[in-house]
Amino acid sequence: MARPRHWIERVARRGRALAVLLALLSMARPAAADGWSLIASPSGSGQAASTANAEGDRLYVWAKHLKDRSLVFAEVHLENEEFAGRMPVYRIDDGETVDAELIRREGEKQGSLWGFVAGRACFWLIWASDRATVDDKDHLARWMTGKRLALTFQAADGAQKETDFSLDGSRGPIERATDLKMP
């Protein structure tokens, strides 16, 4: 029996439609920084934890629950820049740098869409598990307990740029948005 395709995989085959959707979603953001809140997910599926920085860039954390596992994604919408079509790299506090391009490629190897970038928006997988709890050693725990997310990306003009987001207060909204708990 054929394995059912994840909704994101179907959308990925319609690359232009996703690029248009991401562009439209990137237009609906506040212009000033705020704290973490629970809002409708930009994926159109459930809720997302979200915050904005002083530049108006917006960060979302949302989940897709499958029968056998949960997938948690980070999504960034830039206010004044466009991505050059390359996935960003990021670091939480003084932790190791994570290359979202490697995550995207690993998903492709498995026939899944774990990362995508177009225009002002991108998203990538930050956690996958068959458990409903987040261990304090899990990567998602850093998103819930860290202080700062630094995102480095290549802008459409070719320049290397950075944007950052406060992670203070992210735990509660991320737990509510993803239906996952950290003990």
Image (cartoon, helix red, strand yellow):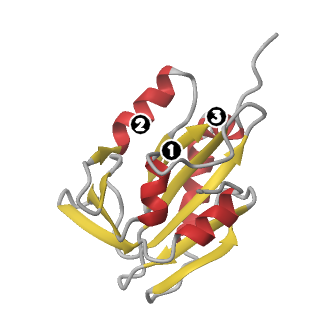
Residue 104, position in %: x, y?
44, 36
Residue 173, position in %: x, y?
62, 71
Establish if 110 lies above or below 69: above
Q: Amino acid at mark 1?
A: Leu
Q: CA distance from mark 1 to mark 3?
A: 13 Å
Q: Which residue is mark 1?
A: 125
Between circles 2 and 3, the one closer to the viewer is: 2
Question: As drawn, is 110 to the left or to the right of 40?
Answer: left
| The one of 28 and 131 positioned closer to us in this rendering | 131
On the image, which quarter does residue 39 sit in? bottom right
Q: Which residue is mark 3?
A: 9
Establish if 29 lies above or below 144: below
Residue appearing at x 52%, y 38% in the figure:
114
Say few, some or many: other residues with alpha carbon within 10 Å of mark 3 (under 14 / 14 to 19 / 20 or more): some
| The one of 20 and 9 positioned closer to us in this rendering | 9
Determine the secondary structure under disc 2. Answer: helix
Q: Mark 1–mark 2 contact, CB under 8 Å?
A: yes
